[in-house]
Amino acid sequence: MKIPVTSGASSSARRTLSIIVLATSAALLPAASFAEVPGKSVKQVPGYYHMSLGDFQVTALYDGAISLTTSLLKGISDSETQAMLADMFVPVTKDGVQTAVNGYLVNTGKDLILVDAGAATCFGPTLGGLGNHLKSAGYETTQVSKVFLTHLHGDHSCGITADGKMVFPNATVYVTKGEADYWLNKETAAQAPKEAQPFFQAAQEAVAPYETAGKLKQFVAGDALADGVTSVPLAGHTPGHEGYMFSSKGQQLLVWGDIVHSHAVQFANPAVSLDFDTDKKQAVATREKVFARAAKEKFWIGGAHLPFPGIGHVKEQESGYRWIAVEYSPLPAGN
């Protein structure tokens, strides 16, 4: 649109005409369309994280999280616990503190080894994701050749079995003799307190199909179990609780199971035990010993109940220790 303006028109008149032109032009344009804001996503990213360890590849697998009440921590006052949690910005809800459940898949080039298999359906709907995340990470359950259990609590062992059948049909399941002698012993289970008997039942049902198929192998704590893999005795949380040290080209990772349940409390104060510890005194002694070794030797740690991916280092500080989590990084080319 062109509106003639005489040369003698005032500047004020010209401005008025310009405004009219702009307004008229805008009215002639098609109405602008704006995309609607979508609803919030209800899904998190798949729970796996790859890391190179020499020639090995380690994949942390997230089974999920469960809330544990702070009253389960023993040897510390509630006020001290709350202060330590607040200092680490750990949220505390009416249900307790979020606690991760992690497993670790290690591809050695010769074996595909899974350390702990998650809870499956044993502990409710917030756990049981490990199998799906294993597939998201690029693997199939049929490819796993060995399953090393740190111990036979259900959040570590229930995931090896589904509906009475082997989830990992081509794998041999490994458990320490000390662990098997306790949890798989019918007499011990029968004599256990009533509230503890479901733990025995879950352990026995988890390993049953592997035992029937001749795929349950007991070993003595400290045994070498595969090329580059040695078991590490870490008893206390349970009678035969075990860790697994993976070594390749001078790099090491200790998958230590349930050495720590509360990263905000137990690193700074290793003397704090857990109500579920079978032998609290031994659990504390084991934790202090492995903390000292990890800090001195600077090897990697993979922890079942550390915030996902649960991989990092232990460093000594003026009072106790602190946890230094792995920094997210891409894999080297060709890995």
Image (cartoon, rainbow, N blue to C red):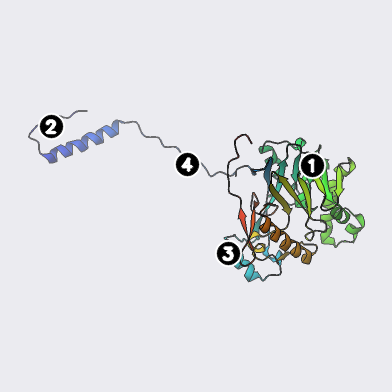
* Residue position for label 1: 146
* Residue position for label 4: 37
Query: Residue 72 in the image: x percent, y percent?
Result: 71, 64
Residue placed at 67% from the left, 58% from the top? Answer: 296
Instruction: For the residues labelled 4 and 3, say whether their Cβ atoms are less than 8 Å apart.
Output: no
Horizontal side of 181 relative to 42 (left or right) equals right
Q: Nearer the viewer, mark 2 or mark 1?
A: 1
State whether residue 139 is above or below residue 243.
above
Q: Quadrant of the N terminus?
A: top left
Distance of label 3 from label 1 (alpha carbons): 40 Å
Q: Crowdedness of circle 1 by 10 Å Cα count: few (<14), some, many (20+)?
A: many
* Residue position for label 3: 86
Q: Nearer the viewer, mark 4 or mark 1?
A: 1
Instruction: For the residues labelled 2 and 1, say whether their Cβ atoms are less than 8 Å apart.
Output: no
Judging from the image, what secondary structure is the residue with disc 1 in? strand
Numbered mark located on residue 5 in the image? 2
Q: Amino acid at mark 1?
A: Lys
